[in-house]
Amino acid sequence: METTIVNRVAQSSLVTLDPQDFREAGEIVEIDVKQRLFMGLILKEKDFRAFVAEMDVEKYRDKHVALHCSADAIVPVWAYMLLAATLAPVARSVFYGTPQALEAELFLRKIRQTDFSEYRDKRVVLKGCGGTPHAVYVELTARLRPWVKSIMYGEPCSTVPVFKAK
C-alpha cells in the first residue's frame, strides 16, 4: 500500500510574513563622538568644528548614519546638529542613536508606511528570524492585530499562538 504524503502546511490558509522584508534598504555606518572628545570627557567646540569641516562626507553617501557617543560624557546637542547638517545632503538618513537603534528604526519606518488591510481575516505567521530587533515583532503585531484572524510566531510547521480574534 502506497501512502501519499500531504503537506498540510502548504494547503493551509496561513500567510507567512518575513520581518526581514520590512527593512528599509541601505548600509548602516556610525559616527561615535567619543573619538572626538578631549581626554575622553570634553568636547572642544573649535576642534570639533574643524573635524566636521575636514570630514570626508563622501564615505557616508547613500548610507544610514547613526550619531551617538559611547562614552559617559555630556555632548552638547549642537554637536549632533552640526554633524546632521553636514551629512544630510549626502547620507540616505541621519539618525541620533546607536547603530542598533537605527537598525530597528529602519524596519519601523517601512512598517509604519505599510497598509496591512490586505491581511484582513487572514491567519498570519510572523517568521522567527535571528537578528531581527524585537521592536519589529511588537510593531508588526500591533499593526496586524486589527485586521487578522490570528497571529502566530515561528515557522508554519511549528508556531506559537500570539493573538486570535474573537
Image (tube, rainbow, N blue to C red):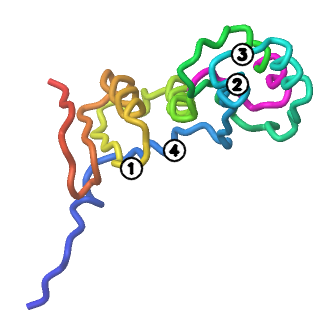
Instruction: Give how far across and how far down residue 115 sits, in percent.
Output: 49, 26
Would you call the spot at circle 4 few (<14 residues within 10 Å), some (14-19), or many (20 or more)? few
Q: CA distance from mark 1 to mark 4?
A: 11 Å
> Which residue does the numbered mark 3 point to in the structure image?
43
Q: CA distance from mark 3 to mark 2?
A: 21 Å
Give the amino acid type for the residue marked by disc 1 in the picture: Cys
Would you call the spot at circle 3 few (<14 residues within 10 Å), some (14-19), or many (20 or more)? many
Q: Is residue 114 visible?
A: no
Seen at 56% across and 28% down, the residue is: 70
Q: Are marks 1 and 4 in contact (CB under 8 Å)?
A: no
SS assignment at label 4: helix
Give the amino acid type for the residue marked by disc 3 in the picture: Leu
Which contiguous range is marked in magenta?
84-97
Camera-nearest residue between 49 and 64: 49
SS assignment at label 3: loop
> Which residue does the numbered mark 4 point to in the structure image?
21
Mark before the other along the chain sequence, 3 or 2: 3
Quadrant of residue 156 within the rendered picture: bottom left
Can you say which quadrant of the picture contains the C terminus? top left
